[in-house]
């Protein structure tokens, strides 16, 4: 029998200074421990001990030359967490504070997220402490090429298929894909999130944000409610936030905030039309600040160093980074009467905030369910690459919507508690079962 605190104490001892990874594991183990303890096969297979351990971690020195012809050195990783239900799959994050612990947390989350999509994908994550902010395009290209030279021997279209994440978009995926082709001479679906010209899928750039709103729509529908006319607070202003704002508008909601590391923008009139396109311009300027929005649209206001959660809105959608929403933010949102929280960043809320929302019976969607749309369309990109075909935007979008509805259904089936749905528990149990069963079926 497993004991949560004993198990976690041991894990902390074995993984010092990896707080984010410990946080992610604790949430999953707390959700599934009763399922495991009542399943003789899981116990006999020591399933928890095995599932929290990555299959392999590749760490490399990434050397590149900057525009001043100086040698630069960064650290890179590919964490291949679990391939029980399919080849390793997960994004690459370039951000200056990335550590191995960050990538282990993201890889661990990815295992259960990918399982929820119902597509055959294992979980992985990669990245580097390279900071793309302010770098020229040539520097980014040289870094991406060097990163791929370090990683290429560990990946392949039936082994491990990386994609984008923070700091890695279509441009960076293109540079890495180009280097893969130069190294192997193969044009295969070894990366997803490629441009259309390189064999990417329609709707992939929009997918995470669209998926999150499809999930939110299901949450509201279950409560006999509707997104139409609701006000929404979004954080972040990158690719995920952009897709979320786009779909929220399409569904008739009004998005009043976006944010960056510098602060947040409050636009009472709603972020719609041209303003949504401007988010992409801010992103491609590579400055990583959101303040230029109010220079362009002066009726909006900018709040330096503040977070959007101080605003009174019906729905909160964190789309920036892990642990961006703390317990004080959670209390403020609840005291302002927030109806729903749809975590779209990976582990966007601290554990105490999640417990607070659940304690107040606020419907709270965890990132691994709400943001699964991105990797789902990556899975659809892999299918199109293998079939040597391309689907229309509508075909992909319809499939994405159906996947998100299914994930919502699985969360309800495993997390319903009377009228309330504990989506954290539902997502963790549903995602865990498939991976655990596959691991037991295959022996060790
Ligand atoms: N980085 C995204 C995520 O966190 C997408 C991964 C992928 O498409 O492989 O799920």
Image (spheres, rainbow, N blue to C red):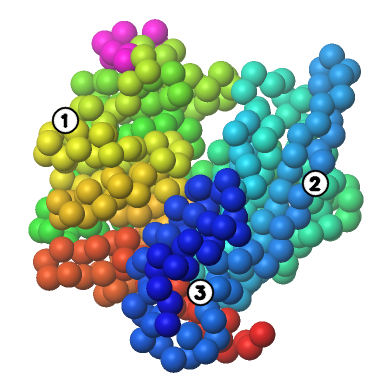
Q: Picture quarter containing residue 384?
A: bottom right
Question: Position of 320 compared to 318: left or right?
Answer: right
> What residue is shown with label 3?
48
Magenta stretch: includes residue 300:
yes
| Residue 444 rendering spot, x and y as whole percentages | 66, 85
Point out the frontmost of discs 3 and 1.
3
The residue pinned by badge 2 equals 60
Query: Any magenta on residue 401?
Result: no
Q: Residues within 10 Å of mark 2 (few under 14, many from 20)?
A: some
Q: Residue 356 vs residue 158: left or right?
A: left
Question: What x and y, as percent, mark residue 12?
Answer: 53, 57
As rendered, which of 270 and 132 lies closer to the eye? 132
Q: Which residues are magenta?
A: 295-303
Quadrant in which the N terminus appears: bottom left
Q: Disc 1 or disc 2, which is closer to the eye?
A: 2
**First of labels 3, 1 by sequence position:** 3
> Which is more N-terminal, label 2 or label 3?
3
| Relative depth, front residue between 271 and 288 | 288
C-alpha gap between disc 3 and disc 1: 41 Å
Which residue is the site of mark 1? 312
Q: Answer with mark 1 or mark 2, whichever residue precedes in sequence.
A: 2
């Amino acid at each position: 029998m497993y004991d949560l605190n004993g198990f976690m104490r041991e894990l902390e001892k074995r993984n010092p200074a990896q707080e984010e990874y410990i946080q992610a594991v604790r949430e999953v183990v707390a959700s599934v421990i009763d399922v495991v303890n009542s399943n003789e096969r899981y116990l006999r297979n020591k399933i928890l001990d095995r599932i929290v351990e990555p299959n392999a971690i590749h760490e490399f020195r990434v050397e590149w030359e900057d525009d001043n012809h100086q040698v630069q050195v960064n650290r890179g990783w590919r964490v291949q967490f679990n391939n029980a239900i399919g080849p390793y799959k997960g994004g690459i994050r370039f951000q200056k504070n990335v550590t191995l612990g960050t990538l282990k947390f993201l890889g661990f989350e990815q295992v259960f997220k990918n399982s929820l999509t119902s597509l055959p994908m294992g979980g992985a994550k990669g990245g580097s402490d390279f900071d793309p902010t302010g770098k020229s395009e040539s520097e980014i290209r040289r870094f991406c090429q060097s990163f791929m030279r370090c990683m290429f021997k560990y990946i392949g279209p039936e082994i491990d298929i990386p994609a984008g994440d923070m700091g890695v978009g279509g441009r960076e995926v293109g540079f890495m894909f180009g280097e893969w082709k130069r190294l192997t001479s193969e044009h295969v679906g070894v990366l997803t999130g490629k441009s259309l010209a390189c064999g990417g899928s329609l709707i992939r750039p929009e997918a995470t944000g669209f998926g999150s709103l499809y999930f939110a729509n299901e949450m509201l529908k279950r409560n006999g409610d509707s997104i139409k006319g609701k006000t929404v607070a979004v954080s972040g202003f990158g690719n995920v936030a952009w897709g979320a704002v786009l779909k929220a508008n399409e569904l008739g909601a009004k998005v009043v905030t976006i944010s960056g590391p510098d602060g947040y923008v409050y636009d009472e009139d709603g972020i719609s039309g041209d303003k949504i396109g401007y988010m992409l311009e801010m992103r491609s300027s590579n400055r990583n600040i959101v303040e230029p929005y109010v220079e362009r649209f002066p009726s909006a206001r900018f709040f330096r160093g503040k977070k959007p959660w101080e605003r009174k809105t019906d729905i909160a959608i964190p789309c920036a980074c892990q642990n961006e929403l703390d317990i004080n933010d959670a209390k403020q949102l609840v005291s302002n009467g927030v109806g729903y929280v749809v975590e779209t960043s990976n582990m966007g809320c601290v554990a105490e905030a999640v417990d607070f929302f659940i304690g107040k019976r606020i419907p709270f969607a965890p990132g691994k369910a709400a943001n699964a749309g991105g990797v789902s369309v990556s899975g659809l990109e892999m299918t199109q690459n293998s079939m040597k075909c391309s689907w229309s935007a509508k075909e992909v979008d319809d499939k994405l919507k159906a996947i998100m509805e299914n994930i919502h259904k699985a969360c309800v089936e495993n997390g319903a508690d009377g009228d309330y749905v504990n989506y954290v528990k539902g997502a963790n149990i549903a995602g865990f079962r498939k991976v655990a069963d596959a691991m037991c079926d295959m022996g060790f």
